[in-house]
Amino acid sequence: MASQLQAVFSALYLWGIGVLTLFNSIRMFQAFALDKNIEIFCEFFELDHQFLLMTCQLLLHLVRKLFFETVCVVEPILKRAGEQFTLDRVDFVTI
């Protein structure tokens, strides 16, 4: 049972790292979009500069919402599981 709980924590930890990586990638792209060089990019691909910025902001908002809603749903489940198995502590797998 403890190994199953540790596997769940490990999976959530890795999923969190993936979400944060995606979050940082979107932020970096958004920062890049503020640069003057993006105008050349937009002209070449016939994109609207403002549309590109709004798309980045929307993606950033969706990633934040997905991450925080998942944490709010999963946290009580994990707390109950921890109380059920009466573990002294749970070690997160660190990379």
Image (spheres, rainbow, N blue to C red):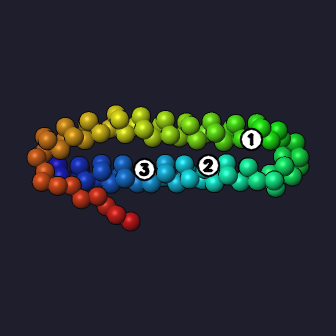
Amino acid type, residue under disc 1 in the picture: Leu
From the image, tell me which residue sits under label 1. 52
The secondary structure type at the circle numbered 3 is: helix
Amino acid type, residue under disc 3 in the picture: Gly
Nearer the camera: disc 3 or disc 1? 1
Left or right? Give the position of 69 relative to 45: left
| Inter-mark Cα distance, 3 to 2 | 15 Å
The earlier-in-sequence mark between 2 and 1 is 2
The secondary structure type at the circle numbered 2 is: helix
Count neighbours of disc 2 (C-alpha within 10 A) and say few if under 14, some if 14 to 19, many if 20 or more: some
x and y, in percent, of residue 55 in the image: 69, 38
x and y, in percent, of residue 49 in the image: 80, 41
| Inter-mark Cα distance, 2 to 1 | 12 Å
From the image, tell me which residue sits under label 3. 16
Residue located 55% across and 36% down the image: 62
x and y, in percent, of residue 72 in the image: 35, 35
From the image, tell me which residue sits under label 2. 26
Disc 2 + disc 1, Cβ < 8 Å:
no
Left or right? Give the position of 68 relative to 89: right
Amino acid type, residue under disc 2 in the picture: Ile
Q: Residue furthest bottom?
A: 95
